[in-house]
């Protein structure tokens, strides 16, 4: 069996094993009584299940619209349109700069006009970006990258903010929210894997690299329709009137400087996501440059699918670690999760949203269960270290296989990164979407 197909098969088996371990930990946690701390009525349980399904279906559609383009953006520019690699690099930079510069405005617009409205705007902007891919014109493609960058900023911030705010209004526990974020990351990996296979098949069938972008537009239309019909609106809290008097970038900097926890989270995001975006652009040319002249063409579809399965393993590993942590706390008689009075106090505090919003940022973060913040903070630091080692390690290999294995480790870290950072950000979502 070819090397890359063997790796994909092996990763699939590891994913199945990780999923089995996670389900076993969940059943053990239920047996120990973690779900008995706050019993729900049948109607509440049914409503929460429907909420989870509605979110995950829409999330799969919108991330699918993003991932289905992934393997072939470079090929569309370079192979179909004949654009040189330096111009392609600038097109990618335009998209990344657009995402960064629009991020503060995205948060303020979500505050003022609503997160559901911003999610709908994402489907429109990203759909228009797909339309621009149909034209082999540098100015039109650059305009598409501007739209795609702004849309990506919405995708990776407002959707999660909508979820966290809606989940808190439904009295989700920290464990339930973390598990849902982990499932979203797992769905992200599943959809990305399927998108890579589908994208390759579509290109082979039609003979054009434009086809995946047409498919992306269709997914966005369906996702937008579901958001419009099934989602409720929610808004950011806090003193928006005061913040609106300042320029968005100035307001964002002021918020960060007032909150050491937010500043630390922002620093971790900048460090990790800058390397991640560089990886998005460079992995195809990096592997192609490392290939020997006599080697067969690299199976980019299989490689991309392997990356996505590695990301799934990362998200499953997060869920497994989270379940084990909860099991340990449930088994210890003096742990916060087993202390009923302390839990009651925390639940009362968490459900009193008006008091929650009135607290300062430092007070609210301190009032979060210390073990939750400590667990995710240490996990985030470890992920940054492993990501750095994997990318630095890839530079020590001259062949494609060594680089590929290092890239797999990095993608595994990406799978854990999103739910971990989501859990760290969740205490701040009432004021800072």
Image (cartoon, grey):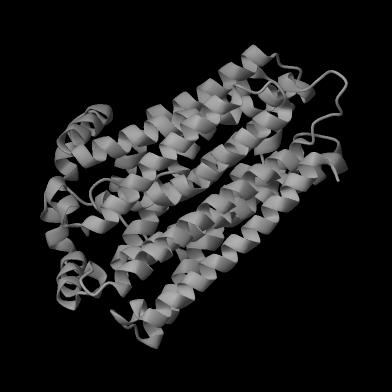
Report the front residue among 421 and 57.
421
Tell me if residue 353 can be seen: yes
**Position of residue 266 measured from the top left corner of the image (x, y, whole percent):** 31, 35
**Position of residue 263 measured from the top left corner of the image (x, y, whole percent):** 25, 35
Q: Quadrant of residue 391?
A: top right
Q: Residue at x 52, y 61 (%)?
A: 56
**Position of residue 170 measured from the top left corner of the image (x, y, whole percent):** 32, 70
Report the front residue among 263 and 393.
393
Report the front residue among 31 and 42.
31
**Is residue 52 positioned above or below 78 on the image?**
below
Q: Is residue 57 left or right of residue 353?
A: right
Q: Residue at x 16, y 42 (%)?
A: 241
Q: Is residue 393 left or right of residue 345?
A: right
Q: Quadrant of residue 166?
A: bottom left
**Position of residue 392 measured from the top left corner of the image (x, y, whole percent):** 53, 25
Report the front residue among 190 and 60.
190
**Is residue 184 positioned above or below 169 on the image?**
above
**Is residue 68 positioned above or below 233 on the image?**
above
**Is residue 26 positioned above or below 417 on the image?**
below
Q: Residue at x 49, y 38 (%)?
A: 152
How many discs appear?
Answer: 0
Tell me if residue 73 can be seen: no
Q: Is residue 151 left or right of residue 246?
A: right
Q: Residue at x 63, y 19 (%)?
A: 88
Q: Quadrant of residue 395?
A: top right
């Amino acid at each position: 069996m070819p090397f890359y197909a063997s790796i994909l098969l092996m990763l699939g088996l590891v994913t199945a094993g990780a999923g089995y371990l996670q389900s076993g930990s969940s059943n053990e946690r239920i047996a120990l009584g973690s779900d008995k701390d706050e019993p729900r009525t049948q109607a509440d349980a049914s409503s929460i299940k429907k909420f989870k399904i509605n979110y995950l279906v829409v999330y799969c559609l919108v991330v699918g619209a993003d991932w289905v383009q992934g393997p072939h953006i470079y090929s569309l520019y370079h192979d179909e349109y004949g654009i040189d690699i330096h111009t392609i690099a600038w097109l990618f930079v335009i998209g990344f700069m657009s995402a960064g510069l629009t991020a503060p405005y995205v948060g303020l617009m979500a505050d003022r006009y609503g997160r559901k409205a911003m999610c709908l705007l994402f489907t429109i902007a990203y759909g228009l970006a797909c339309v621009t891919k149909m034209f082999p014109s540098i100015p039109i493609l650059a305009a598409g990258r501007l739209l795609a960058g702004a849309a990506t900023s919405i995708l990776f911030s407002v959707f999660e903010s909508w979820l966290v705010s809606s989940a808190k209004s439904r009295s989700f526990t920290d464990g339930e929210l973390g598990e849902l974020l982990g499932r979203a990351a797992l769905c992200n990996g599943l959809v990305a894997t399927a998108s890579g296979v589908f994208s390759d098949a579509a290109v082979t069938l039609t003979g054009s690299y434009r086809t995946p972008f047409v498919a992306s537009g269709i997914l966005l239309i369906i996702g937008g329709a579901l958001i419009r019909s099934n989602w409720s609106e929610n808004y950011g809290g806090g003193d928006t009137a005061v913040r609106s008097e300042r320029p968005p970038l100035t307001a964002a900097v002021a918020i960060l400087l007032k909150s050491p926890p937010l500043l630390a989270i922002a620093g971790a995001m900048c460090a990790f996501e800058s390397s991640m975006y560089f990886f998005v652009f460079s992995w195809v040319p990096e592997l192609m440059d490392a290939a020997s002249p006599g080697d067969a063409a690299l199976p980019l579809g299989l490689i991309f699918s392997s990356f996505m399965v590695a990301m799934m393993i990362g998200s499953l590993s997060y869920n497994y670690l989270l379940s084990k942590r909860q099991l340990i706390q449930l088994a210890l008689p003096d742990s916060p999760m087993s202390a009923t009075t302390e839990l009651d106090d925390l639940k009362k505090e968490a459900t009193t949203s008006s008091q929650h919003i009135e607290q300062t940022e430092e007070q609210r973060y301190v009032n979060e269960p210390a073990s939750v913040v400590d667990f995710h903070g240490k996990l985030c630091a470890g992920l940054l270290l492993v990501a750095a080692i994997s990318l630095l390690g890839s530079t020590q290999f001259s062949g494609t296989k060594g680089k590929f294995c290092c890239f797999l480790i990095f993608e595994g870290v990406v799978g854990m990164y999103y739910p971990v950072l989501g859990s760290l950000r969740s205490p701040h979502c009432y004021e800072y979407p």
